[in-house]
Amino acid sequence: MENWAPNKKIDVLYEVIICLVYIIILLVLKMLGVSNLWGIPVFMISFVAIPQTIRRKKQIKKIGLLQNILGISIEEMRSIIDVGKYDLIEWKKDKIMITPKQMYLLEDSLDKKYFLKFGEEFDRQQKKQETY
């Protein structure tokens, strides 16, 4: 866990919480005497996938904004995460063929570059802009 990006740790924590809630729901249903629990595993799979999908969309949006603000080219992004030319053609949702681990690495690296350039965290700056 030491090599994980901070956002990855938060996402794993959300997944653990969701699994615990699922187990509690199963135990309550079992105690209530519900014997037909065949649909519950399908529900759990979709229940865990929803936060992952939302997080992935937020990551894509955040990295795109950081790329524009910092003026980083696709080639520099490829070198940061060490992928080939065809894995990252351009920064569009349907053109990204990188793993979640590489996505977290790229997000963390761009956050650090933003902090070095502007002296504040990107998330804080975004929240300030939203309040105005």
Image (cartoon, rainbow, N blue to C red):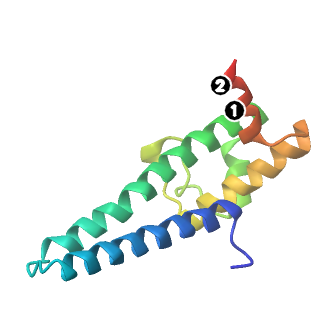
- Circles 2, 1 touching at the beta carbon (< 8 Å): yes
Give the residue type at disc 1.
Lys
Q: Nearer the viewer, residue 91 or 30?
A: 30
Residue occupying the point 90% across, 45% down = 116
Q: Is residue 122 visible?
A: yes
Measure the C-alpha gap from mark 2 to mark 1: 5 Å
Where is residue 54 drawn, in percent x and y? 45, 49
Give the residue type at disc 2.
Glu
> Based on the displayed image, in which of its 4 quarters is residue 124 positioned?
top right
Residue bearing mark 2: 130
Q: Nearer the viewer, residue 3 or 27?
A: 27
Q: Nearer the viewer, residue 117 or 45?
A: 45
Where is residue 112 drawn, in percent x and y? 82, 51
Residue at the extreme front: 32
Residue at the extreme left: 36
Which element is circle 1 on?
helix
Residue bearing mark 1: 127
Which element is circle 2 on?
helix
Q: Is residue 70 left or right of residue 117?
A: left
Where is residue 96 drawn, in percent x and y? 50, 51
Residue occupying the point 65% across, 35% down = 65
Residue at the extreme top: 132
Which mark is on residue 55? none
- Quadrant of the image for the N terminus? bottom right
Residue occupying the point 20% across, 72% down = 40
Q: Is residue 8 left or right of residue 108?
A: left
Tally of numbered discs: 2
Residue occupying the point 50% across, 41% down = 92
Q: Is residue 72 visible?
A: no
